[in-house]
Image (cartoon, rainbow, N blue to C red):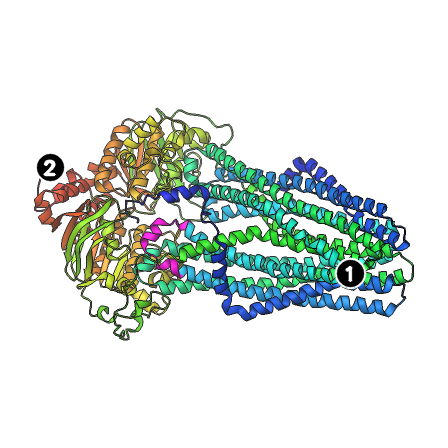
Amino acid sequence: MERATLLKDFFRKAWPAYLAAFGFHFAANLIHVCYPQILGRITDRLQAGALTAGLLAREALVLLAVGAGHVVIGAAGMLLIMYTGRTFEKQVRNRLFWHFSRLGERFHAKNGVGRLLNYFMNDVTAVRESIAMGFNAATNAVMLLAASVTMMVLAGIPPGLVAASVLPLLAIPLFVVRFGPRIRDRSLDVQRALGEMTETAEEQFGGIRVTKSFAVEPIMNARFGKTVERIRESQLRLVRLSAFFQAVVPFLGAASLAVAIVLGGRMAVAGRITLGHFVSLTLYVRMLMHPLQQIGNVVNAIQRSRASLERLNGLLSERPEIADIGRPGDVSFGQAALEVRNLTFRYGPGERPVLRNVSFRVEPGATLGITGRTGSGKTTLAKLILRLIDPPPGTIRIGDADIRELSLESLRTQIGYVPQDGFLFSTTIRENIAFHKRDEELAAVERAARQACIYDSIVRMEHRFDTRLGERGLTLSGGQRQRVSLARGLFKNAPIMILDDSTSAVDAATEQAVIESLRRERKNRTTLIISHRISAIKHADEIIVLDDGEIVQRGTHEALIARPGLYRTFHSIQEEGSRFATGTGDS
Amino acid sequence: MRPAQAIHNWQLDQKADLGLSAPKPRYVPAFRTLVGYMKPHAWRLCAVVGCAVASVMSDLLQPYLVKVAIDDNLMAGRNDWRALIAIGGAYFLLSVAGLAFTYLQGNLLQAIGQSVVAKIRTQLFDHILKQSMRYFDRMSRGGLITHISSDTEAISQFFNQVLLSLIRDGFTVVLILAMMFRLDATLALYSLLLLPAVSAVAAAFRSRMRKTYQLARTRLSRMVAFVAENLSGMSIVQAFHQQKEQQKRLEELNEEYFRANLREIGTNVAFGRTFELLSNLFIAFITWAGGRAVVGHSLEFGVLYAFIAYIRQFFQPVSTITQQWNTLQAATVAVTRIWDVLSQKPDITDRATRGSEGAPDEGRTWPAEGGGSSAAGAGLGRFSPERVKGGIVFDRISFSYDGVVPVIRDLDLEIAPGEMIGIVGSTGAGKSSLISLLCRFYDVDEGSIRIDGTDIRDIPQAVLHRLVGLVQQEPFLYSGSLIDNVRLFDESVPREDVIRACELVGADMIAKKMRNGYDARLSGRGSGLSAGERQLIAFARIAVFRPKVLILDEASANLDSHTEQLLQHALDVVSRGRTTIVIAHRLSTVRQADRIIVMSRGRIAEQGTHEQLLSRRGMYWELYRLSVGQKAGLTNIPESGEQP
């Protein structure tokens, strides 16, 4: 498997920007290091009594020019890199999202929304920080250090003195290496504790009715309080380390200055260096402290981002398990039969099969009803037909083609699907229904809404089809949600349609109307109806009953009801109440 | 489940574009509030200030020492090696002191900050839990979570960054000015001119920085919401082959965020650089002005040196302080928002305690209420489980969610102790609302609901909720063990009781199914339990908490027939000896009920037993006919052989 190399790809394109920024930083720092030099020169002239008012004014102007030039050029380099970094962030996010949308059910189930969102937000940001902020700060610090040392030596300050004065400063990176990872661990603890608290709060608000109706508020408060306490503890643990770390950096700077005062002062007194040298030496040491502090931050950022980068690369290397194979064909489903042959499926090697040796054939235009207990494999079957999960080769065919040999586009655009949970997006009702083709005119959306028996409810809303749904919009009831989802499936007007328990939250009267409408609309078009409710499937041309992944019964409603078996049990429980149930089958 | 009449809240809709950043920061009240929270830590805060002064002083004395070295030794041409060593030594000692005090200050301040934040968090959570259901309908869950986590985190950052900087950098600025005046008043006065200039620059950038910051935040949260939603609905996106379309939208949102970001960065860099430019300008000026004074021998050179060092040290804290602006603002907004939440009085409260009759010791089943409602502990006597019979009266009640559309109108209903009532009716008839009112999730607009003759508004909520048990249509599971999910983390309920309760209602089959049995971890999502199984757990809760009134919103969805039988059994067991109200979706339940209430448009349309209602050939008969379907149903209806 080829491993993704995010940074390499990025630098391959972005190196000119980095080169330019490097140039800017270089120029800015070259100018910057003249600063102490000029002040040193002024000192020497002053001491020599050679400083006139005019000369002083000129030096002050040079000082000003140096200050301004360094600031402006440095800003150019900084902005360039920040821009590049943000571009990186944007591109990686686009790429990640595309990647997410190609990966299959298994991947999404394994990772969950929270974790993927974390990759998408935090990991990308962490990497961006180290290649942008990190680059800026590190380049500045290193250049300033190099340039300062060079300037000092060039100015005639003995290298030994320079080395002795700068030496304590160089201990800063050592401290960083020592403390950086430990600080990071502790700050991760804080993050984790925060996450835990958020989760607990989320859960509590979700279960507010339970909490209230059992009057267990004090217990839930205590439970929440524990997570709050954990945050506090981890924060304090973190600060013990980070406060020390932050104090030690200026301390090392001061230690450097102490060395400079004692050794430099001695040399100045002995006349081996001028007073100007002494002044510029102390100024250089002061100037270097801040960038070297920055190096600490950079190292931390890089450490953080290293793991993030690993994760992102790993994630992007993940191959979509469901993809077009070879040169996929396109088949029109209009007159094609759907056939499932000896389908046995398990989610993972060694796991129990969810479907066992399932075979059936739906002729073009026919309706198949599928029923069975929870966990009998009905939904898996629907997902296999859509290739949301990959079926074993040769087990599912439409027309003459194995669906694995069809392009995903031709397969999925020709099957209408109404999933079990009625998931809707936080956008308008219109966009939700017209999800398949969003620029379609309103009339088509309205038609689908009528077919799904939701039209009346929608037009009663203030914004009708433009009503927004979701967190900050309107919340539909379960039954309404299901019917909008149904309208979305019907809107597709597809040759094959799969309804997965799509009227389960609809009340009986509405359900009847929906089923009638479905029968009318899907007449002579292939339709698979999965349902627990007998009432939803009894009109089907054929009904199969799944139990533990196997087809245990098949036939028409009349035929199935005439003989003992699971179907009749379901039927009698649902229609007459348990006292009349024959009690066959389950234990 | 929420009642069908979802609350159409325009305000929330309006807010959607601004994210949650609605309130104007109110600095003074926010500050006052925080001061209130810090009061218990006054001594520690004094210690922080002391440490800060000490560490700043040790920092600021350093240039002064160099000045002494220059003026008294180097310039004076005195070859006093020992004096230099003494100065260097003092310098080193000062830096050690700086190290120690900085460390202490950071730790102390964080200890204060974290205590305050922890207190606010628990208080906030406690307060939110006390709110009525109406509040939870109105507020988005995301918003509440924002208050609990990010808003409190913003306050935490206030302590970590803003307060730290204000103390440390504030003292630095003040002490630098003091040092400057000590050294040379004229130059110090010049330097004082800096303050207005610096403030002017900061003010000029302030509003722009705030705007760009907020724009970026809003766009970011929009993108996050989009991604989160698409991740959870990925199978839909894929099944409809809409990856490209969704990708396009994401890229649009991403681009918008990118642009907002660039604007924010541009503003911030411009601000920082303007500041630095100002600092360099001033150093050049001081060099010129001070240099002239040195040339004119009215100033020692060492003083000029110290001034230049101080000006450099002066700008850094000022710049750090102004960098705190965003954080300070975010924290103020957060405090404002949190206080908006905290000042929201729960619209359902316990009425003032009537002369409390000293609750008899009820032992485990009725734990004294701690931080909950104040009246909870009192007045329990009359409502102890032994004494409550469970008769319920709905007396001419009316109710609406929004004050406009009535959901329940003038409804009268009397339920005898131990009776089992089935409520049927189409979506929106007011069934869920009726039971929500009985749980006092909402208060009635008119009329009253009485249990054993007492208005439920006169019963402390904590007591009422122990009397009335609810099994929701889609019961909520907590992340925790099966045991804890049944006893709701109440560790005073022994494990054996929980197991017995589970066996009683048939929920033991879930434990048998799970790898870790009763210790299996469940969670809100993805615990692999069906709606029916969740209801079994909820029934077990009832068996543990033993309310006198049971309310069941039957699962209508996704039940297979086996689970249905289990649930039927559980209901049989649990409803024994309890007044039971069921929102019924199953014929079996309906038939078993002592009385069936048919609701329509907020009123009771019909009531009676199954047979009575069928023979009436009204609404119930219609509903029944629809759900039974035509052919099969009729052959099996015993006495009423009506052909449609």
Three-letter code, disc 2: Pro
- Provide the major secondary structure of the magenta segment: helix
Question: Horizontal and vertical percent for residue B435?
Answer: 24, 54
SS assignment at label 1: helix
The disc numbered 2 marks a residue on which chain?
B
Three-letter code, disc 1: Ser
Q: How many residues crowd mark 2 within 10 Å: few (<14), some (14–19), many (20+)?
A: few
| Left/right of residue A449 with respect to residue A176 in the rendered view | left
Residue furthest right as drawn: A271
B452 in relation to A106, above or below: below
| Left/right of residue B333 with respect to residue B129 in the rendered view | right
Question: Horizontal and vertical percent for residue A312?
Answer: 57, 45
The residue lying at 62 percent from left, 68 percent from top is B50
Magenta span includes A540: no
Tell me the tag on residue B19.
Answer: none
Question: Horizontal and vertical percent for residue B102?
Answer: 65, 64
* Mark in the foreground, 1 or 2: 1
Question: Which of A189/B30 is in front?
Answer: B30
A185 in relation to A506, above or below: below
Question: Horizontal and vertical percent for residue A491?
Answer: 34, 30
Extent of the magenta region: B126-142
Disc 2 designates what residue?
A: B644
Question: Which of A341/A536 is in front?
Answer: A536
In this orientation, does residue B29 appear? Answer: yes
Query: Which quarter of the figure has residue B19?
Result: top left
Disc 1 designates what residue?
A: A256
